């Protein structure tokens, strides 16, 4: 028999993960973000109507629709994606890799910079390119190898929305 998620299971998991009660009538930002995550997971992983999804957390269908639209915008802006993925893991669902607008812009800028450099290099003759390689490129690549980079990988501990 297939183990299907219920609205109650999803709401309980969001409450437990965030440390917030999304069923009470309160209009604080952290409650709203947690409810948006509940709306999204409920909509994509159950066959329940918007009315029933909202009823589980004492909201109407219009609030669910607005929350789903707002969720998509927030994810694109890079907000709440860590919490969303954390709740998905708690429910044993596939974690969604999301790319924010900032990451898309950085990728596009990198591609434009690479094209610009390639165009400039194509303009050089053999002697100029050889000189560039020996005096600029090789020393730069050598200096990159000797740099020490500090990486920071925070681990989520407890509720993420406090």
Image (cartoon, rainbow, N blue to C red):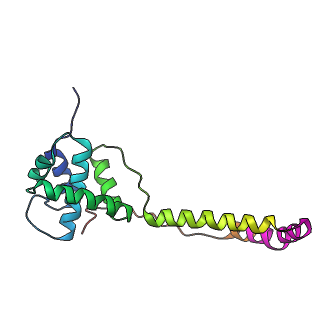
Residue 123 visible to an observer of this rendering: yes
Quarter of the image where the C terminus is located: bottom left
Magenta portion: prevailing SS class:
helix
Residue 156 visible to an observer of this rendering: no
x, y percentage for residue 131?
88, 71
70 or 92: which is nearer to us? 70
Residue 102 belongs to the span the image colors magenta: no
State which quadrant residue 29 falls in: bottom left
x, y percentage for residue 114?
67, 64
Q: Which residues are magenta?
A: 125-141
Q: Can you name the residue that lies furthest to the bottom here? A: 135
**Left or right for 94, reference 57:** right
**Left or right for 56, reference 90:** left
Q: Is residue 146 above or below residue 42?
A: below
Residue ID at (64%, 68%):
113
Quarter of the image where the N terminus is located: top left
x, y percentage for residue 10?
19, 48
Residue ID at (8%, 51%):
55
**Left or right for 137, reference 153:** right
Residue ID at (10%, 50%):
56
Residue ID at (85%, 69%):
134
State which quadrant residue 99 falls in: bottom left
Q: Is residue 149 above or below residue 85?
A: below
């Amino acid at each position: 028999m297939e183990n299907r998620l219920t609205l109650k299971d999803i709401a309980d998991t969001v409450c437990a993960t965030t440390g917030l009660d999304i069923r009470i009538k309160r209009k604080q930002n952290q409650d709203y973000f947690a409810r948006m995550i509940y709306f999204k997971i409920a909509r994509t992983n159950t066959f329940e109507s918007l009315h029933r999804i909202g009823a589980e957390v004492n909201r109407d269908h219009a609030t669910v629709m607005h929350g789903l639209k707002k969720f998509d915008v927030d994810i694109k802006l890079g907000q709440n994606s860590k919490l969303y993925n954390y709740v998905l893991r708690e429910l044993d669902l596939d974690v969604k890799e999301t790319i924010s607008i900032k990451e898309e812009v950085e990728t596009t800028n990198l591609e434009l910079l690479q094209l610009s450099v390639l165009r400039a290099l194509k303009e050089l003759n053999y002697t100029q390119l050889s000189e560039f390689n020996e005096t600029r490129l090789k020393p730069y690549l050598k200096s990159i190898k000797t740099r020490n980079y500090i990486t920071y990988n925070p681990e989520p501990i407890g509720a993420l929305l406090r």
